Amino acid sequence: MLKLRFAADRRCLFYTFVLFPGVGLAHYVEPRLVGWLLPLSLYMGYCAGIFSHNHNHCPTFVDRRANTWFGAWLSIFYGYPLFAWIPTHNLNHHKHVNRAGDATITWRYTKEHTFWTAATYFFVSAYFQSGPIKEYIQKAREQGGKVQRQIRTQAASVIVAHVSLLGLGIALWGVPTGILVYAFGFAIPALFALWSMMFTNYIQHVHCDPWSPDNHSRNFVSRWNNWFVFEAGYHSVHHEHAGTHWSKYPELHAARAHLIAPELNEQSIFSFCFKNYVLGVFTDKYRTKQVGRAAYDAPGGNLATDSVSAVEAGINAEIA
């Protein structure tokens, strides 16, 4: 029942069943750890986001029931039911890849890439993703069956777990301290999981060329960094092979890297952010620039406009 599809996911299971709860519950055992474990907790949240994304593309276990319960367990640490990836990411983002129609487009209100735009992208993206999520829930409710049960199971897991963890913190240490241990143990990492996944999506696509088969995504290629993020830096090959297991990304990227514009193969997220958001304050030399054709310029070349609605209408009409 618990047979893995890929042996590489043993490390994911160690994180998911040992590190995620262990780091979180450490705050309950010793409240003085509040704040000190924050970097590790945020890293756990980021990994929870990565695992959630990967599990929706390539289920972890052979058995369907095991995948259902694993999705519910992951939802607790991700801070949101995992089913939401399906309508917003699997069925929407992968179809449009930052072009018109993508609920997660990076250019909705501005074509400029600044730290403020990237940092607040979560709120914009979350708002526009709410539509596809509501439609997906409504359709599942009308059809009933396993999808509706999956939604209910994951939603119940998140609500029950977080209410229980908050209650446990208060029962052990009283209201003020109890809220703090819950916040730093589970709530903040979960919120960071959600924010960081959208932030990463933003920087992986801003100023890329979604009309190109090779330059639609930005990659972070440091082997050392990718070990810690389970090869999530290889984003181009993920879009080209969405159902392929994450452990295969390095070899797929190696075969494709020479086709990708050099400026879209960055070393790491950290160096990218330092260049754009620190050095970029002083000079445009270090800030991203549009590579190839912009998302709002369809192949016809005459749809550039400041109006997102006009772009979407024009591109959709041209494609049709």
Image: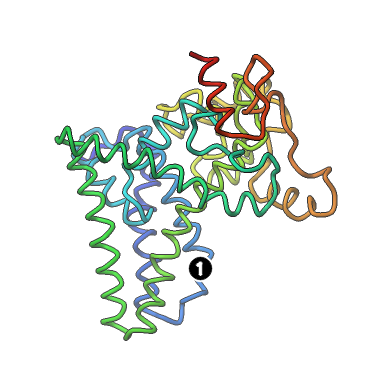
Q: Amino acid at mark 1?
A: Leu
Point 38% across, 84% down: residue = 176
Q: Residue at x 57, y 39 (%)?
A: 233
> Would residue 208 appear left or right of 146 to someone viewing this image?
right
Q: Position of residue 314 (x, y in %)?
A: 57, 22
The count of marks equals 1
Position of residue 164 relative to residue 13, above or below, is below
Image vertical order of residue 318 relative to residue 263, above or below: above
Observer-nearest of 252 and 158: 158
Colour scheme in use: rainbow
Tag 1 residue: 38
Relative to residue 296, is residue 163 depicted above or below?
Answer: below
Q: Whole-percent x and y of residue 87?
A: 36, 35
Residue 294 in picture, x, y percent from top left: 67, 27
- Asked if residue 30 lies left or right of residue 105, the reply is left
In the rendering, at what x and y percent does residue 59 appear? 32, 35
**Circle 1 residues within 10 Å: few <14, some 14–19, many ≥20:** some
View extreme (left): residue: 145
In front of the other: 54 or 2:
54
Quarter in which the N terminus is drawn: top left
Q: Secondary structure at mark 1?
A: helix
Comparing 252 with 72, the one in front is: 72
Is 93 placed left or right of 20 in the picture? right
